């Protein structure tokens, strides 16, 4: 979806419009739950959502800037770097990391290296650095979100998260271009891209993700997110060229995607049967 947004559109504009629109759609459907959640956990819910929104707006904006240096396929693989940086975040928070997670990170890292290595060029390094920074912020975001989803109503979190992320993006957008909406080259492609992104990514996908966070750990969620590469490559290969830049499958791309899937399975499957108890104890200690 990022690839469909014209390069002339400021990243803050996209983050602002899609976050606000998605939040309004969710509020229209679940406003009673949001109001009830505010009455029950108003202060802590708002403060937590504010923090999440800052992280969300920051990493989404960094993604929009960083992806300008890559094609659809290479850009999709850079998203998976969140898996690689997550252990650093968990270790800094003094949380234990299982052997399965380290194995998963190693396999995913190999997949990214194989997929990006042959095509990576010197002029793409600044974009790669921006994407790495975005993945670091996303890893922090996922850890905090996983904790919050177990304490508060997930749909209410999704509503306030989108609202605050949109408002923060608007502030930064204003400093970049005070004309805001009046300075945009509005086209049918832009409107369609924003509408699809707002509905499917911000409203539906983000809401489902936060609901799922209530039942999984941050590590589980991050590794599952890495499977985005499979869907990105698949849609890029089958969608018509008038919608997106077609994806050209190469042996490196296929091997890289296969390793990322293998890394995800290494994290999800509890081959030793001990993981559930250990992670349950870890979650209790963190709370």
Image: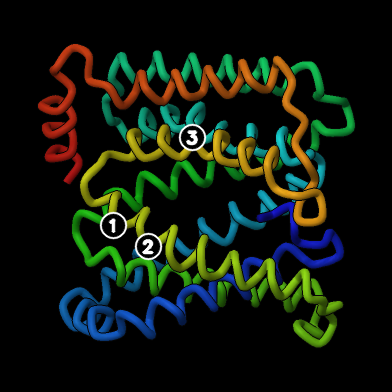
Q: Nearer the viewer, residue 178 or 33?
A: 33
Which of 100/257 is in front?
A: 257
- 284 vs 233, left or right, is left
Q: Which residue is label 2 attached to?
A: 207
Q: Nearer the viewer, residue 16 or 233?
A: 233
Under tag 2, what secondary structure? helix
Helix, strand or loop at disc 3? Answer: loop
In the rendering, at what x and y percent does residue 112 appear? 62, 22
Determine whether 84 is above or below 37 in the image: above
Earlier-in-chain disc, 3 versus 1: 1
Residue at 30% from the left image edge and 72% from the top image edge: 156
Residue 63 point in image, percent of width and height: 66, 49
Q: Is residue 209 above or below residue 266?
A: below
Q: Quadrant of the N terminus?
A: bottom right
Marks 3 and 2, the one that precedes in the sequence: 2
Q: CA distance from mark 3 to mark 1?
A: 18 Å
Q: Which residue is mark 1?
A: 211
Q: Position of residue 110 (x, y in %)?
A: 58, 14
Give the numbered dot on residue 120: none
Q: Residue at x 22, y 20 (%)?
A: 270
Q: Is residue 58 left or right of residue 92?
A: right
Q: CA–CA distance between discs 1 and 2?
A: 6 Å
Q: Say if mark 1 contacts mark 2, CB within 8 Å.
A: yes
- Residue 205 position in % (x across, y down): 44, 58
- When asked about the image quadrant of residue 8, the answer is bottom right
- Who's the residue at 30% across and 14% down the image? 99
């Amino acid at each position: 979806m990022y690839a469909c947004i014209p390069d002339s559109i400021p990243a803050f504009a996209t983050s602002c419009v899609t976050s606000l629109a998605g939040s309004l759609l969710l509020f229209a459907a679940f406003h009673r739950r949001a109001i009830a959640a505010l009455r029950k956990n108003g202060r802590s819910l708002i403060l937590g959502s504010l923090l999440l929104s800052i992280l969300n707006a920051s990493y989404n904006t960094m993604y929009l800037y960083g992806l300008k240096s890559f094609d659809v396929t290479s850009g999709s693989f850079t998203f998976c770097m969140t898996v690689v940086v997550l252990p650093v975040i968990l270790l800094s928070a003094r949380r234990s990391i299982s052997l399965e997670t380290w194995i998963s990170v190693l396999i995913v890292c190999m997949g990214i290296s194989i997929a990006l290595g042959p095509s990576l060029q010197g002029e793409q390094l600044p974009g790669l650095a921006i994407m790495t920074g975005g993945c670091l912020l996303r890893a922090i975001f996922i850890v905090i979100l996983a904790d919050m989803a177990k304490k508060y109503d997930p749909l209410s979190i999704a509503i306030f998260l989108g609202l605050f992320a949109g408002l923060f993006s608007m502030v930064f957008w204003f400093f970049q271009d005070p004309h805001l909406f009046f300075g945009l080259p509005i086209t049918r492609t832009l409107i369609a891209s924003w509408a699809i992104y707002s509905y499917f990514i911000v409203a539906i996908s983000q809401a489902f993700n936060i609901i799922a966070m209530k039942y999984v750990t941050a590590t589980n969620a991050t590794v599952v997110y890495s499977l985005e590469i499979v869907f990105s490559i698949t849609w890029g290969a089958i969608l018509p060229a008038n919608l997106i830049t077609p994806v050209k499958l190469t042996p490196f791309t296929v091997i890289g995607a296969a390793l990322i899937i293998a890394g995800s399975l290494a994290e999800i499957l509890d081959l030793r049967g001990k993981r559930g108890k250990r992670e349950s104890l870890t979650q209790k200690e963190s709370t």
